[in-house]
């Protein structure tokens, strides 16, 4: 009597490979979030290079709630700030520019002012090097 | 007499390369995916200056109501109180003095919350802060 052995298929079944792959794609597409990974940099002064800033010798930009700007106690629009700073900084490039936002001022307005000042090379032709954002504790301790 | 033998066209869509394409897409997603360490939902301020933030930077997020979450850059962010930000920052700086910090604050948060965070970072001797922002689109007036 002839015994016939059933032939076993030696291939790896790959018919479901595409289904698995597309499931993985869908998983990645659904879970991927496009993270905001850009921002405006701000170097903090280290102890050894923190000079005491005299209010009289600097330009003070105060930001009030609602984005109202007072530059050296003069009311000003954001677009006018660099034009105001240009002649002062041409005479003294190291003149400190102090940005001071009120306690209840929305953070976004402070960033708007900082962004405007960082755009100085494009708008007025030179970089503003000495920008200071003192905290309330520093103002209480060092302001004179 | 048989005059014309029409060849039978295969009407199926060739799907043999489907799995290859799918795996290429999977590899693309796996390589480009960024795992966000902080998923706090905030309305970011908009700036024109936007620099790439280094990977593994430490995150501090501040919501509109002033709630704070922190992450050392590798783990998922955890909520902390205002008073704990200084110890968190000091710990991060002690491990890596050049570590960058990312401040992810809501544009509508009162500045006093951000001021307190910046003050903690200054006291912890952090060197650089990135103020996370969205791209500001420049609107051009018609004919302008």
Image: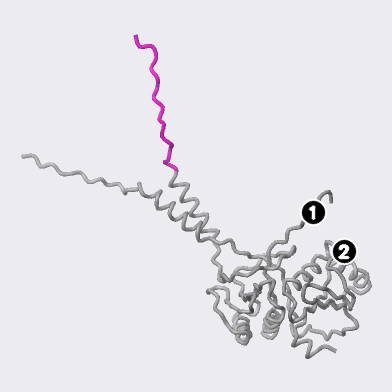
Q: Quadrant where the C terminus of chain A lies?
A: bottom right
Disc 2: host chain = A
Quickly name the residue at label 1: B140
Q: Position of residue A71 (x, y in %)?
A: 87, 75
Residue A66 x/y as whole percent: 77, 73
Q: Which residues are magenta?
A: B1-17
> Would residue B25 be found to the left or right of residue A139 on screen?
left
| Residue B4 within the segment the image draws in magenta | yes
**Quadrant assignment, res B62:** bottom right
Q: Residue A83 appears at what percent x and percent y?
A: 89, 67
Quick one: SS at disc 1?
loop
Asked where in the image residue A5 lies, by quadrant, the reply is top left
**Magenta span: helix, strand or loop, mainly?**
loop
Label 1 Cα neighbours within 10 Å, binned few <14 / some 14-19 / many ≥20: few
Cα–Cα span, label 1 and label 2? 20 Å
Disc 1 vs disc 2: which is toward the camera?
1
Q: Residue at x 61, y 74 (%)?
A: B59
Asked if the stretch drawn in magenta spans residue B24, the answer is no
Which residue bears the numbered disc 2?
A124
Pick the quarter of the image with the N terminus of chain A: top left
* Chain of the residue that carries numbered disc 1 in the rendered image: B
Question: Horizontal placement of A58 versus B104: left or right?
Answer: right
- Spot the residue most to the left: A1
């Amino acid at each position: 009597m002839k015994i016939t052995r059933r032939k076993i298929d030696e291939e790896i079944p790959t018919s479901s490979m595409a289904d698995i792959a597309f499931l993985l794609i869908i998983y990645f597409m659904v879970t991927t979030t496009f993270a905001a990974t850009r921002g405006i940099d701000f170097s903090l002064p280290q102890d050894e290079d923190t000079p005491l800033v005299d209010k009289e010798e600097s330009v003070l930009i105060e930001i009030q709630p609602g984005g109202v700007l007072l530059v050296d106690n003069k009311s000003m629009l954001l677009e006018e700030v660099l034009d105001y700073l240009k002649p002062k900084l041409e005479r003294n490039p190291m003149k400190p520019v102090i940005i001071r936002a009120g306690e209840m001022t929305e953070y976004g307005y402070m960033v708007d002012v900082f962004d405007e000042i960082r755009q100085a090379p494009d708008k007025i032709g030179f970089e503003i090097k000495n920008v200071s954002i003192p905290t309330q504790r520093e103002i209480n301790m060092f302001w004179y | 007499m048989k005059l014309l033998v029409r060849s039978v066209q295969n009407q199926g869509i060739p799907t043999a390369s489907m799995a290859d394409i799918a795996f290429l897409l999977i590899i693309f997603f796996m390589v480009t995916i960024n795992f966000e360490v902080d998923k706090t939902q905030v309305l970011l301020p908009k700036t024109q200056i936007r620099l790439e933030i280094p990977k593994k930077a430490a995150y501090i997020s501040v919501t509109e109501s002033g709630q704070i979450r922190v992450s050392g850059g590798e783990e998922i962010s955890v909520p902390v109180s205002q008073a704990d930000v200084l110890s968190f920052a000091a710990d991060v700086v002690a491990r890596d003095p050049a570590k960058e910090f990312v401040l992810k604050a809501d544009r509508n948060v009162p500045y006093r919350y951000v001021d307190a965070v910046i003050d903690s970072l200054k006291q912890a001797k952090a060197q650089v802060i990135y103020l996370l922002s969205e791209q500001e689109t420049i609107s051009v007036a018609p004919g302008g």
